[in-house]
């Protein structure tokens, strides 16, 4: 089960602030410098000293702050290294009783990490790359203004390509006050040209070319087939992708976007995109083509033929039986629920795994659940065992909730020792699981005997991918979705593979 990885970078505000987060330059305005344009007119130390006569200065390697006397900085938590500088300024007697605080951070990092920070704030990378983002002038650079959120902070980001340095400033308090403006204008970045060149943008990068090799598992020969996107998909996120294939269409879920592709062995062709009301983290479907999208701790919705057709009161991640008549809902260590579909009205009652986070109330072997898969004959549950050193296991139940099999090695050296299960299936000859952490595909016989494991490196020729999701297709083959970082650092390649032979 994939849970959204929250990522936050800190950032910066301007001399010209007039609104809550400052006076912003609208896209298209003349700029002396943009957050994307890396040619920067750098002030010398002497010029800066002359500009801010009468102020104290704090030099932290990657930036210098010329600050008015009413501002102080946290000497206990500041940091200065060759690749990282950080400080917090505040305008009260102590940091805790201050009305305004400004956090300044500079980090030597690759463009990939910086761009992931932009995405975490909801920035459209193409608009950013085209110079369409709102900006503010701060010191000697032009910062991109991050979209407003519920944190009450104003956040700004800037990337200096030639030095490979990302600058972030976060303002808490009255960002439009004169005292905040005065401090911000004294933040001067150390913008040295060190010859760095950032990676291409995701849509300009070099796609990954897999090298497929058949692999033996027991007496079976597993044959891989690459199902490419007609247009290469370079993505910045990993561990967040879900898919469902129904008939000749594949539905791909990433946060608040549901994309539809036409599926053929020659590749996936984009059909349409649907924007959802909120981010969703889990996707399942039934034989009618209904898709069940789960935000996790909020209500599950149903989508069919590109339209929302079902609103439920069911929460958690919902995996539905192929018939669409019932399913199992789960979420981390919450109580599992059995879901009944009564004419489109979904109701819930406790299932057999409850009290996961309470030793004295727990029913079942799990302390946390990673994934659930309802097959044509069984219910497969993967997660962390409550027993000490129990590790990750897959338990196979019948529909009545009786435990039939336990899959996964107990010892750390076991060939089927499991890490994080991101997909499961029951085939004609046994059980299969995709292990994201171990980068392996595990195979067991019908009686639970371990048959073998295949590394993604061996079968797909990709070095260290994340296995995102897996589905058993109607013809008995397995469709696997993974992400693999490109060699040029521009993005992660979103890739589908089909397996036959087991």
Image (tube, helix red, strand yellow):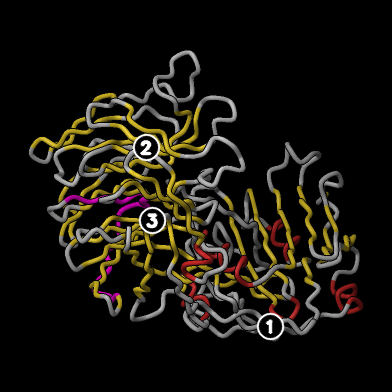
At mark 1, the secondary structure is loop
483 horizontally vs 11: left or right = left
- Which residue is pictured at 58% across the width and 52% down the height? 153
The image quarter containing residue 176 is bottom right
Residue closer to the observer: 420 or 156: 420
Instruction: Identify the image quadrant of residue 13.
Output: bottom right
> From this viewpoint, is residue 145 visible?
no
Q: Is residue 222 visible?
A: yes
Q: Answer yes or no: do the residues labelled 1 and 3 have beta carbons within 8 Å?
A: no
| Residue closest to the eye, 143 or 173 | 143
- Residue found at x 76% / y 41%: 95
- Position of 100 relative to 381 (above/below): below
Question: Looking at the figure, which quarter contains the C terminus?
Answer: bottom left
Write down the residue under mark 1.
197
Query: Can you tell which of label 1 and label 3 is closer to the viewer?
Result: 3
Residue 207: x %, y % from top left: 48, 80
For residue 183, which quarter of the picture?
bottom right
Task: Find the distance from the CA under tag 3 to the CA under tag 2.
Answer: 15 Å
- Determine contact: label 3, label 2, CB under 8 Å: no
> Which of the labelled discs sits on residue 381, or is there none?
2
Q: Which residues are magenta?
A: 268-286
Residue hosting label 3: 469
Mark closer to the chain start, 1 or 2: 1
Mark 2: secondary structure = strand
Q: Could you give the CA–CA distance between mark 1 and mark 2, rounded to whole angstroms? A: 46 Å
Give the structural element (helix, strand or loop) at label 3. Answer: strand
Residue 75 in percent (x, y) is at: 86, 47
80 to the left or right of 303: right
């Amino acid at each position: 089960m994939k849970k959204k990885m929250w990522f936050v970078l800190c950032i910066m505000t301007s001399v010209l602030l007039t609104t809550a987060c400052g006076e912003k330059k609208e896209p298209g305005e003349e700029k002396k410098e943009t957050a994307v344009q890396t040619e920067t007119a750098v002030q010398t130390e002497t010029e800066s000293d002359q500009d801010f006569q009468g102020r104290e200065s704090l030099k932290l390697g990657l930036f210098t702050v010329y600050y008015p006397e009413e501002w102080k900085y946290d000497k206990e938590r500041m940091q200065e290294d060759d690749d990282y500088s950080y400080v917090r300024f505040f305008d009260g007697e102590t940091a805790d009783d201050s009305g305004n605080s400004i956090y300044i951070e500079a980090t030597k990092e690759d463009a990939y990490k910086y761009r992931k920070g932009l995405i975490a704030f909801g920035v459209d990378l193409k608009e950013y790359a085209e110079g369409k983002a709102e900006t503010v002038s701060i010191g000697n650079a032009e910062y991109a203004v991050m979209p407003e959120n519920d944190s009450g902070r104003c956040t700004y980001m800037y990337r200096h390509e030639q030095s490979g340095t990302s600058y972030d400033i976060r303002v808490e308090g009255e960002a439009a006050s004169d005292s905040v403006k005065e401090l911000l204008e004294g933040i001067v970045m150390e913008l040295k040209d060190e010859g760095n060149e950032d990676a291409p943008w995701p849509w300009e990068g070099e796609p990954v070319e897999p090298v497929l090799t058949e692999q033996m598992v027991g007496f079976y020969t597993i044959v891989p087939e690459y199902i490419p996107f007609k247009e290469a998909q370079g993505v910045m996120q990993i561990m967040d992708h879900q898919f469902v294939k129904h008939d000749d269409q594949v539905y791909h879920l990433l946060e608040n976007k549901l994309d539809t592709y036409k599926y053929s062995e020659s590749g996936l062709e984009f059909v349409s995109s649907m924007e959802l009301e909120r981010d969703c983290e889990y996707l399942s479907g039934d034989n009618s083509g209904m898709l069940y999208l789960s935000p996790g701790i909020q209500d599950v919705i149903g989508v069919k033929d590109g339209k929302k057709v079902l609103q439920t009161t069911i929460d958690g991640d919902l995996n539905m039986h192929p018939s669409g008549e019932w399913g199992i809902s789960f979420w981390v260590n919450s109580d599992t629920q059995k879901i009944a579909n009564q004419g489109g009205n979904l109701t819930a009652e406790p299932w057999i795994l409850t009290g996961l986070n309470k030793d004295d109330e727990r029913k079942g072997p799990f302390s946390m659940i990673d994934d659930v898969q309802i097959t044509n004959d069984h219910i497969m549950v993967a997660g962390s065992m409550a027993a000490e050193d129990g590790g990750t296991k897959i338990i196979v139940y019948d529909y009545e909730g009786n435990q039939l099999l336990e899959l996964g090695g107990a010892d750390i050296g076991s060939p089927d020792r499991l890490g994080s299960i991101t997909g499961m299936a029951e085939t004609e000859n046994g059980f299969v699981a995709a292990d994201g952490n171990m980068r392996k595909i595990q195979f067991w016989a019908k009686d639970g005997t371990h048959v073998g494991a295949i590394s993604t490196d061996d079968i797909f020729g990709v070095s260290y991918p994340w296995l995102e999701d897996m589905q058993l297709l109607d013809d008995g083959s397995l469709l696997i979705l993974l992400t693999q970082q490109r060699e040029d650092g521009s993005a992660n390649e979103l890739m589908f593979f089909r397996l036959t032979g087991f």
